[in-house]
Amino acid sequence: MHAPIVSVINGEPLASTEVIARGFKVPHRNVIGLVRAHAGTLAEFGVIATQLRFNPRGKPTEFALLNERQATLVMTMLRNTPQVLQFKVALVREFYRMRDALNQRDQNLWQQMQALIAREVESKVRASFGSHLMLERKREIPYFTTERERLEAELQPSLLPH
Protein backbone atom coordinates (compact mmCIF):
# COMPACT_ATOMS: atom_id res chain seq x y z
CA MET A 1 0.00 0.00 0.00
CA HIS A 2 1.39 3.39 -0.99
CA ALA A 3 1.41 6.45 1.21
CA PRO A 4 -0.95 9.21 0.09
CA ILE A 5 0.66 11.91 -2.04
CA VAL A 6 -0.51 14.66 0.33
CA SER A 7 -1.39 14.22 4.01
CA VAL A 8 -3.07 16.67 6.34
CA ILE A 9 -1.03 17.25 9.49
CA ASN A 10 -2.25 19.78 12.05
CA GLY A 11 -4.73 21.11 9.51
CA GLU A 12 -2.13 21.73 6.79
CA PRO A 13 -1.66 19.69 3.60
CA LEU A 14 1.94 18.40 3.48
CA ALA A 15 3.92 16.17 1.13
CA SER A 16 6.83 14.03 2.30
CA THR A 17 10.13 14.17 0.42
CA GLU A 18 9.97 10.35 0.36
CA VAL A 19 6.63 10.41 -1.46
CA ILE A 20 7.90 13.12 -3.81
CA ALA A 21 11.04 11.09 -4.62
CA ARG A 22 8.98 7.95 -5.22
CA GLY A 23 6.57 9.89 -7.46
CA PHE A 24 9.37 11.46 -9.49
CA LYS A 25 11.19 8.11 -9.60
CA VAL A 26 14.42 9.67 -8.33
CA PRO A 27 16.51 8.64 -5.31
CA HIS A 28 15.27 10.18 -2.07
CA ARG A 29 18.78 11.50 -1.38
CA ASN A 30 18.41 13.76 -4.46
CA VAL A 31 15.18 15.31 -3.20
CA ILE A 32 16.35 15.73 0.41
CA GLY A 33 19.61 17.14 -1.01
CA LEU A 34 17.63 19.82 -2.86
CA VAL A 35 15.74 20.62 0.34
CA ARG A 36 19.00 20.97 2.29
CA ALA A 37 20.71 22.99 -0.45
CA HIS A 38 17.79 25.41 -0.76
CA ALA A 39 16.61 25.39 2.86
CA GLY A 40 16.86 29.18 3.14
CA THR A 41 14.67 29.76 0.11
CA LEU A 42 12.19 27.05 1.12
CA ALA A 43 11.99 28.52 4.64
CA GLU A 44 10.58 31.72 3.11
CA PHE A 45 7.42 29.70 2.50
CA GLY A 46 7.18 28.22 6.00
CA VAL A 47 9.01 26.04 8.48
CA ILE A 48 10.58 22.95 6.95
CA ALA A 49 9.55 20.05 9.17
CA THR A 50 12.34 17.46 9.08
CA GLN A 51 12.09 14.11 10.80
CA LEU A 52 14.08 10.90 11.15
CA ARG A 53 12.72 7.47 10.39
CA PHE A 54 14.67 4.38 11.42
CA ASN A 55 14.71 1.25 9.28
CA PRO A 56 14.52 -2.22 10.92
CA ARG A 57 18.33 -2.28 11.27
CA GLY A 58 18.30 1.07 13.08
CA LYS A 59 19.71 3.19 10.25
CA PRO A 60 18.14 6.66 10.22
CA THR A 61 16.65 8.29 7.13
CA GLU A 62 15.98 12.01 7.21
CA PHE A 63 12.90 13.23 5.39
CA ALA A 64 11.06 16.54 5.22
CA LEU A 65 7.39 17.45 5.15
CA LEU A 66 6.79 20.25 2.65
CA ASN A 67 3.80 22.52 2.35
CA GLU A 68 2.27 23.26 -1.05
CA ARG A 69 4.54 26.22 -1.84
CA GLN A 70 7.70 24.40 -0.76
CA ALA A 71 6.77 21.27 -2.73
CA THR A 72 6.01 23.41 -5.78
CA LEU A 73 9.42 25.08 -5.53
CA VAL A 74 11.19 21.71 -5.23
CA MET A 75 9.23 20.47 -8.27
CA THR A 76 10.54 23.36 -10.37
CA MET A 77 14.09 22.25 -9.59
CA LEU A 78 13.63 18.83 -11.21
CA ARG A 79 14.09 18.16 -14.91
CA ASN A 80 10.83 17.65 -16.82
CA THR A 81 10.97 14.04 -17.91
CA PRO A 82 7.59 12.52 -18.84
CA GLN A 83 7.43 10.75 -15.45
CA VAL A 84 8.34 13.90 -13.52
CA LEU A 85 5.79 15.96 -15.43
CA GLN A 86 3.08 13.36 -14.79
CA PHE A 87 3.79 13.37 -11.05
CA LYS A 88 3.95 17.19 -10.93
CA VAL A 89 0.40 17.29 -12.28
CA ALA A 90 -0.73 14.64 -9.77
CA LEU A 91 0.90 16.47 -6.85
CA VAL A 92 -0.63 19.83 -7.79
CA ARG A 93 -4.07 18.20 -8.20
CA GLU A 94 -3.76 16.50 -4.82
CA PHE A 95 -2.80 19.73 -3.04
CA TYR A 96 -5.82 21.48 -4.59
CA ARG A 97 -8.12 18.56 -3.74
CA MET A 98 -6.89 18.51 -0.15
CA ARG A 99 -7.27 22.29 0.21
CA ASP A 100 -10.83 22.09 -1.15
CA ALA A 101 -11.66 19.26 1.27
CA LEU A 102 -10.31 21.27 4.23
CA ASN A 103 -12.25 24.36 3.14
CA GLN A 104 -15.43 22.27 2.80
CA ARG A 105 -14.90 20.82 6.28
CA ASP A 106 -14.36 24.29 7.75
CA GLN A 107 -17.43 25.61 5.93
CA ASN A 108 -19.47 22.69 7.27
CA LEU A 109 -18.28 23.45 10.82
CA TRP A 110 -19.34 27.08 10.44
CA GLN A 111 -22.76 25.96 9.21
CA GLN A 112 -23.08 23.64 12.22
CA MET A 113 -22.12 26.52 14.53
CA GLN A 114 -24.74 28.79 12.91
CA ALA A 115 -27.42 26.10 13.33
CA LEU A 116 -26.44 25.60 16.98
CA ILE A 117 -26.63 29.34 17.68
CA ALA A 118 -30.07 29.49 16.02
CA ARG A 119 -31.34 26.56 18.13
CA GLU A 120 -29.99 28.16 21.29
CA VAL A 121 -31.65 31.50 20.52
CA GLU A 122 -34.93 29.71 19.75
CA SER A 123 -34.62 27.87 23.07
CA LYS A 124 -34.16 31.17 24.94
CA VAL A 125 -37.22 32.67 23.24
CA ARG A 126 -39.38 29.62 24.05
CA ALA A 127 -38.16 29.68 27.68
CA SER A 128 -39.44 33.22 28.06
CA PHE A 129 -43.03 31.99 27.42
CA GLY A 130 -43.47 29.79 30.49
CA SER A 131 -42.06 27.66 33.27
CA HIS A 132 -42.53 24.33 31.44
CA LEU A 133 -40.48 25.66 28.51
CA MET A 134 -37.95 27.14 30.95
CA LEU A 135 -37.33 23.64 32.39
CA GLU A 136 -36.89 22.29 28.87
CA ARG A 137 -34.33 25.03 28.23
CA LYS A 138 -32.40 24.12 31.39
CA ARG A 139 -32.15 20.54 30.14
CA GLU A 140 -30.86 21.74 26.75
CA ILE A 141 -28.13 24.06 28.11
CA PRO A 142 -25.53 21.29 28.76
CA TYR A 143 -25.97 20.05 25.18
CA PHE A 144 -25.55 23.57 23.78
CA THR A 145 -22.43 24.12 25.89
CA THR A 146 -20.84 20.80 24.95
CA GLU A 147 -21.65 21.15 21.25
CA ARG A 148 -20.40 24.75 21.13
CA GLU A 149 -17.09 23.75 22.79
CA ARG A 150 -16.66 20.86 20.32
CA LEU A 151 -17.29 23.08 17.30
CA GLU A 152 -15.06 25.86 18.61
CA ALA A 153 -12.24 23.36 19.23
CA GLU A 154 -12.52 22.08 15.64
CA LEU A 155 -12.75 25.58 14.19
CA GLN A 156 -9.83 27.06 16.14
CA PRO A 157 -6.95 25.39 14.22
CA SER A 158 -8.29 26.74 10.93
CA LEU A 159 -8.40 30.28 12.31
CA LEU A 160 -4.67 30.36 13.05
CA PRO A 161 -2.59 32.33 10.51
CA HIS A 162 -0.67 30.17 8.01
Image (tube, rainbow, N blue to C red):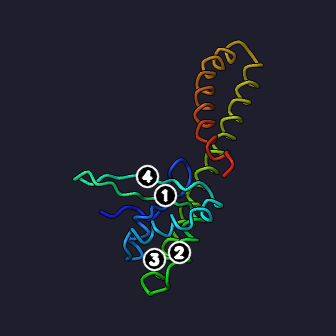
- Estimate the spatial distance between the alpha carbons at disc 2 and disc 4, rounded to whole Å: 20 Å
Q: Which residue is denoted by mark 2 in the rendering?
A: 75
Secondary structure type for disc 4: strand
Instruction: Locate residue 74 relative to residue 107 in the image: left or right.
Output: left
- Estimate the spatial distance between the alpha carbons at disc 4 and disc 3, rounded to whole Å: 23 Å
Q: Give above or below for 8 relative to 139.
A: below
Along the polypeptide, which appears first: circle 1 or circle 3? Answer: 1
Disc 3 marks a residue whose amino acid type is Phe
Cβ atoms under marks 1 and 4 closer than 8 Å: yes
Please tell me which residue is depicted at 63% across the width and 27% down the height of the picture.
Answer: 144
Q: Give above or below for 117 relative to 102.
A: above
Along the polypeptide, which appears first: circle 2 or circle 4? Answer: 4
The label shown at residue 65 is 1
The label shown at residue 51 is 4
Cβ atoms under marks 1 and 3 closer than 8 Å: no
Instruction: Locate residue 3 relative to residue 34 in the image: left or right.
Output: left
Residue 85 location, x and y as percent?
Answer: 48, 82
Residue 41 location, x and y as percent?
Answer: 62, 65
Foreground pick, 11 / 133? 11
Instruction: Locate residue 4 relative to residue 54 in the image: left or right.
Output: right
- Estimate the spatial distance between the alpha carbons at disc 3 and disc 2, rounded to whole Å: 9 Å
Please tell me which residue is depicted at 55% across the width and 58% down the height of the picture.
Answer: 101
- Estimate the spatial distance between the alpha carbons at disc 1 and disc 4, rounded to whole Å: 8 Å
The label shown at residue 87 is 3
